[in-house]
Amino acid sequence: MKKSAKTRFLPGNMKMMHLLKSRKHADTCKPALQKRPSLFKQHNIKTVLGLDIGNNALKAVKIIKKNNEVTVVDFDIIEYPAALPNTKLLESHHIRDAIKIFLSKHTFSKKTDVVVSVPGQLALSRFSTIPLVSKKQLKSLVSFEAQQQIPFDLKDVVWDYHRLSGRTPNEEGIEIGFFASKRETLDSIINNISFPEFNLTGILSSPLAIYNLVLFDQHVEGPTIIVNREEENTDLIIIDHAHFWLRTIPLHEVNADFVKEIQRSMEYYKSLSKSTDTVHFEKLLFVGNKSNDPLLQKTIQDNFTYKVELLNTLNNIRISRTVDQALFSGNCASLSVALGLAIQGIGLGKTAINLLPKERILAAQIAKMKPYAVVALGCFALLIAIQYIGLCTHISKLNNARNYHQAMLQNVKNLENTYKNADKIFNEKKSELEFISSIDPARFFWIESTEKLLASIPDNVSINSLQSSWIDPDALNIGEGKAKKNQKDSIVKKCLLMGIRGESREPGIRYIEEHVLQPIKNLTLSGQKIAAFKNVELVPNSCRQVYSEAEATECISFEIRWLVKSQEEIIAESEKM
């Protein structure tokens, strides 16, 4: 074993002389109704290990959920040297050495479910608002929006999303949080913890783990700012009832810039609400490795008027007698990520985000089912053996006849499924072809619309990309709402969704609305007096100030999207005119 990793804290194995009265009461006053056979008790017990891989320490917390009670039964903090400046954090061999030390000090009777963290600076979080859609259409629309929000090829990342509760009732649109990390980063994490004792069930970013812990264990009544202070960066988590927002600040020094970044993040979050008067921060909560820094606490208290607290007490999580409670309480803030990971693993997390690649999740589920499959196969084999001894010849004939008829039946079912699939594909392609043909192909729609669109753009506005996608009308809460079906074959026609991204050198959004948005709304194609597009709008939260390297100046980036009118719509509007 290499000596580069050293143990900072040992897991608590000392018996405590006195427990809190509430816990003592809970241990001694159990009603008789709780007594039941141990076989049924096992089904209500779930054990999960949360592993927080930090810049210079491995933090682990083992939690057991028994019935409705959550208990910390073990924990450990193992330090190791920080990664060199030119070395990636997760490629450091010190991490694997620390896990080996952890395994040498702790025993595992069987494979333990493990949820591991990916540091906040190595994970991406984006928040976007999409139109109101049904649950049936939500998945396709979210996939389309993920391509716009995640600045990487989706093949190179693992991503998941969470539907946020609205800040105000009756809000138009659905707010979605997108969370992603590169596959090479996740592969490094998986390689680090690939030990026979571990059954990896989930990967979660550190800020999301803290969000899980605070929502489950702490009493959060109003908008709260959580500062996760680590060695190389700081995570900001804003919790606003069931709504939340994340940001990672790449600063490790507590100075004026650090304070400005926190203030800037708070103001930006307030700007996301339609009414800034509804957001009133009440508390600032410290967690993380460096949360006990006196300079940090003094700086925050000097620059903010909110109630400042350090997470050092758990409300809904018990501490086992075998754990040194004083030692655990002193490191509670440092263990917040590991606690949140374990909360997610036992199924009590507020979100269901999991950045573990889908193929790994499937493999873990199959591995869990293997013991049950072996038992089932064993029982089946025993039953067949008993019947074979008594009725060998008769069973052989029955089995042959049954197998023959089952094969025939299966062939019929396969043919039926093949026909249904072919019919479904035919209808889908037919619907798309009918819609494309309805746009009057003689006018060369794509060439003409692209040329006129680009010609309407002012010289001081640059277009970076043009996107298009076919979607179901039900995916957007616009127009007549329901898709029109062909009376003969009941085929739902699809809509063409288009969009552009660009940059304006003019400093105001109003210029974009007047000289880009309005011309697109009024754009007509040859032979028509009716505008070719409908529902032209600026994508919410897309306008922001950026630096253009091509122009070497500050610009305003924007995104506009719209729907292409069908030929039937254009004809109907023309007749009205």
Image: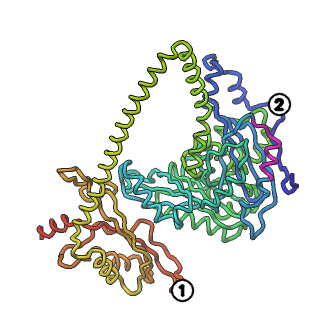
x, y percent for residue 51: 70, 48
Structure colour scheme: rainbow
Cα–Cα span, label 1 and label 2: 68 Å
The x and y percentages for residue 338 are 69, 47
Taking the image as shown, residue 112 lies to the left or right of residue 517, namely right
Name the quarter where the C terminus is drawn.
bottom left
State whether residue 496 is above or below residue 397: below
Visible in this render: residue 333? no
Q: Is residue 249 among what the camera can see?
A: yes
As for residue 1 lying within the magenta part, the answer is: no
Question: Circle 2 sits in a helix, a strand or a loop, which is it?
Answer: loop
Q: Main secondary structure of the magenta part?
A: helix
Residue 188 locus on image (x, y percent): 68, 57
Q: Which mark is residue 121?
A: none
Q: Looking at the rendering, which quadrant does residue 207 occupy? A: bottom right
Image point 47% across, 61% down: which residue? 146
Image check: 377 left or right of 419? right
Picture quarter containing residue 538? bottom left
Q: Is residue 129 or residue 156 the one in the foreground?
A: 156
Give the crowd class for mark 2: few <14, some 14-19, many >=20 residues within 10 Å: few
Which residue is disc 1 drawn over? 552
Mark closer to the chain start, 1 or 2 = 2
Q: Is residue 213 above or below residue 15?
A: below
Q: Where residue 17 is drawn, which disc sits there? A: 2
Choose between 292 and 156: the one closer to the eye.
156
Q: Residue at x 35, y 76 (%)?
A: 513
- The answer to whether residue 96 is left or right of residue 125 is right
Q: Which one is nearer the viewer's eye here, 392 or 307?
A: 392
Amino acid on which disc 2 is placed = Met
10 Å neighbourhood of mark 1: few (<14), some, or many (≥20)? Answer: few
**Disc 1 marks which amino acid?**
Ala
Bounds of the magenta segment: 97-108
